[in-house]
Image (tube, rainbow, N blue to C red):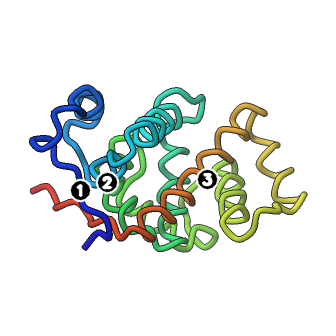
């Protein structure tokens, strides 16, 4: 159970514009936004940030989802895993088998050399803020400066999300049938 109450749309007509914007993009008001709406400016900044990471970067959707799923697995981020597998990762080109293989991507038959470099980079970011030069150089060999910045911000974003959703114990969304 969440440590802070969820904002329900029917009880907060003053938040109609924010809720409409979220529902327009997400299809519904999910728990993370219901909770963040206690501070509408923070909620909308979070919403805009996620939108920028997901839809306005040069990262290929497959790479973005591989990175998100790997981060979620590594930091035990159940909320992101449930949101992304399978409903986002699979349409963006990551099979369920590949999502599972990300748990041990080094020993997997999946993933290109470039994807492996990105996964090594993401793992290094999760492990510590300081990324070893050889890991950075490997990712830089395959990706532009812009893509490296975007991959780095994506990793930091999902690490932050994990901290927020875990600290506040945001409930998982009910599974869609």
Counting from the top left corner in percent of width and height, residue 136 is at 82, 53
Q: Mark 3 vs mark 2: which is more N-terminal?
A: 2
Gap in angstroms between the C-alphas marked 3 and 2:
22 Å
* Crowd tier of the residue under label 3, counting other residues whose Cα lies within 10 Å: few below 14, some 14–19, many 20 or above: many
Query: In which quadrant is the C terminus drawn?
Result: bottom left
For marks 3 and 2, give the one nearer the viewer. Answer: 2
Label 1–label 2 contact, CB within 8 A: yes
Q: Nearer the viewer, residue 170 or 122?
A: 170
Secondary structure at badge 1 equals loop
Secondary structure at badge 2 equals helix
Residue drawn at (32%, 65%), measured in percent from left and top? 170
Q: Mark 3 vs mark 1: which is more N-terminal?
A: 1
* Crowd tier of the residue under label 1, counting other residues whose Cα lies within 10 Å: few below 14, some 14–19, many 20 or above: some
**Along the horizontal axis of the image, is 153 left or right of 9?**
right
Residue drawn at (44%, 68%), measured in percent from left and top? 77
Where does label 2 land, which residue?
35
Counting from the top left corner in percent of width and height, residue 9 is at 15, 41
**Along the horizontal axis of the image, is 164 left or right of 95?**
right
Where does label 1 land, which residue?
6
Q: Would you place residue 79 above or below residue 155 in this image?
A: below
Counting from the top left corner in percent of width and height, residue 162 is at 48, 63
Gap in angstroms between the C-alphas marked 3 and 1:
27 Å
Where does label 3 land, which residue?
155
**Along the horizontal axis of the image, is 160 left or right of 146?**
left
For marks 3 and 1, give the one nearer the viewer. Answer: 1
Counting from the top left corner in percent of width and height, residue 20 is at 22, 28
Q: Mark 1 vs mark 2: which is more N-terminal?
A: 1
* Crowd tier of the residue under label 2, counting other residues whose Cα lies within 10 Å: few below 14, some 14–19, many 20 or above: many
**Along the horizontal axis of the image, is 35 left or right of 104?**
left
Gap in angstroms between the C-alphas marked 1 and 2:
5 Å
């Amino acid at each position: 159970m969440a440590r802070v109450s969820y904002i329900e749309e029917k009880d907060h007509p003053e938040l109609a514009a924010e809720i409409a914007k979220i529902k327009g993009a997400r299809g519904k008001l999910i728990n993370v936004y219901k909770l963040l709406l206690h501070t509408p400016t923070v909620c909308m900044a979070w919403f805009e940030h996620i939108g920028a990471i997901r839809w306005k970067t040069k990262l290929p959707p497959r790479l973005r989802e591989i990175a998100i799923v790997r981060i979620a697995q590594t930091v035990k981020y159940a909320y992101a895993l449930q949101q992304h597998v399978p409903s986002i990762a699979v349409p963006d080109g990551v099979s369920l088998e590949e999502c599972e293989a990300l748990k041990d991507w080094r020993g997997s038959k999946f993933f290109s050399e470039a994807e492996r470099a990105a996964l090594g980079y993401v793992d290094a970011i999760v492990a510590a803020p300081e990324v070893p030069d050889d890991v950075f150089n490997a990712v830089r060999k395959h990706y532009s400066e812009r893509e490296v910045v975007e991959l780095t911000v994506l990793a930091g974003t999902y690490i932050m999300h994990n901290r927020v959703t875990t600290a506040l114990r945001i409930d998982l969304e009910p599974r869609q049938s």
